[in-house]
Image: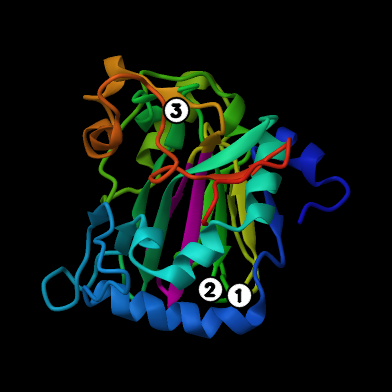
Amino acid sequence: MLADGDVESFYADGFVTVDSLIDLDVIEPLKERFERLFRGEFETGISPDEVNWLEGRSDQWLTRQICNGWKADRLIASTVLDARLGEAIAVLAGWPGARIIQDNVLWKPPGARSLGFHRDNAYLAWYAPTEMFSCWIALDDTVAGGGTMEIARGSHRWPAHGDLFGEFHAPDDYRATVAAAAKTTGADLDIAPVEVPAGGGSFHHGWAWHGSGPNDSDRHRRALVLHCASSEARFNRAGFGEGNGPIYSRYARLTDDEMDENHFPILWRRDGYRTPGI
C-alpha cells in the first residue's frame, strides 16, 4: 500500500496520502452499513464501545461518530482488520506488529459542523508505549471545504504542551488548539486538507495535529478510521482515569497488564502471527 517515497514523506510531514486503500466494490456496501449502525442496528448483536450519534435522537448538525463499529458489523470488521493495513501502519511506526485499539465510523453530511484539532497520542495514557498511528479511509471523494480531515504538516515533531485540549465536537473555532500550539512552539502553521478519491485516504502519526472543518459542500463525507498501537502494547493502570482510559480500561485483566486479543486483536506481526479468527 506504500509507494516509493511514502515513508520519507510520512517522516517529514507526519502523514502521507494514498489514492487506493480499499476495493471500490466495497464502498457502497460500507455506506449501507453506516446507515444501519447510526440507526442502532448492530449486525453481531454487540454494541460498539462508543455511540455518539443516533438517528432521531441526536443533533442533525453534529458529525456522526461511532467507535469500534467493527465489533458490531462484520463488513466494517473485514475492512479495518485487514492485515495489509496493519502491516503498513507497523512499517510507518517502526513496530514489530500492529494491533487495533479503536476504529471510528464518521459521517459528516452537508451542513454538519466541525471536529476540533487534536493529537491522538494525548488521550492514551492508559496503555504503553503511549503511541497510536492511524489510517483514515474515505468512502466519498473529499475536497477542501467539504469537511475533509486536515493535518498540520510537520506538527508530529512539535513538543507536547500538556497537552492542549479543546472542544472536540462542533467547537466555534476548530483550529484554535493547533493555532495555540503553533504559537507556543514558534512553528509555522501549514494545514493540508486530505483530498483523495473514494477508497483512498491517509496514514497519520499519533502526534500530528488534525481535525476537520464544517461540511460546506453539498456532498456527504463518510470515513472509516483505523487506530493502531504496537503489537507489544500493554495496559498502564496508572493512566486508566485519563483520556479515553475510563472506556477501554474495562477490558483489563485482573492479574496482568496484557491486552486481550479478543478486544485488541493483532492485525499483523513481522513473524507472521495474526490473531486467530479475525
Residue 181 disc label: 3
Name which residue type carries label 2: Leu
Asked whether residue 146 is in view, the answer is: no
- Please state the horizontal and vertical placement of residue 10, each as a whole percent of the image: 72, 40
Determine the CA span between mark 1 and mark 2. Answer: 5 Å
Determine the CA span between mark 1 and mark 3. Answer: 32 Å
Instruction: Please name the residue shown 38% across and 69% down the image.
Output: 73
If you read the primary sequence from the N terminus, does the residue marked by circle 1 or circle 3 appear first? Answer: 3
Residue 198 disc label: 1
Instruction: Please name the residue shown 39% across and 64% down the image.
Output: 106
Q: Is residue 126 left or right of residue 13?
A: left
Q: Residues within 10 Å of mark 3 (few under 14, many from 20)?
A: many
Q: Which of 19 and 145 is in front in this view?
A: 19
Residue farthest toward the top in the current orientation of the protein: 238
- Please state the horizontal and vertical placement of residue 180, each as a whole percent of the image: 40, 30
- Please state the horizontal and vertical placement of residue 57, each as a whole percent of the image: 11, 72
Name which residue type carries label 1: Ala
Looking at the rendered structure, the secondary structure element under dot 1 is loop
Q: Residues within 10 Å of mark 2 (few under 14, many from 20)?
A: many
Q: Give the range drawn in magenta.
A: 210-228
Q: Do the residues labelled 1 and 2 touch (CB within 8 Å)?
A: yes
Q: Nearer the viewer, residue 165 or 251?
A: 251
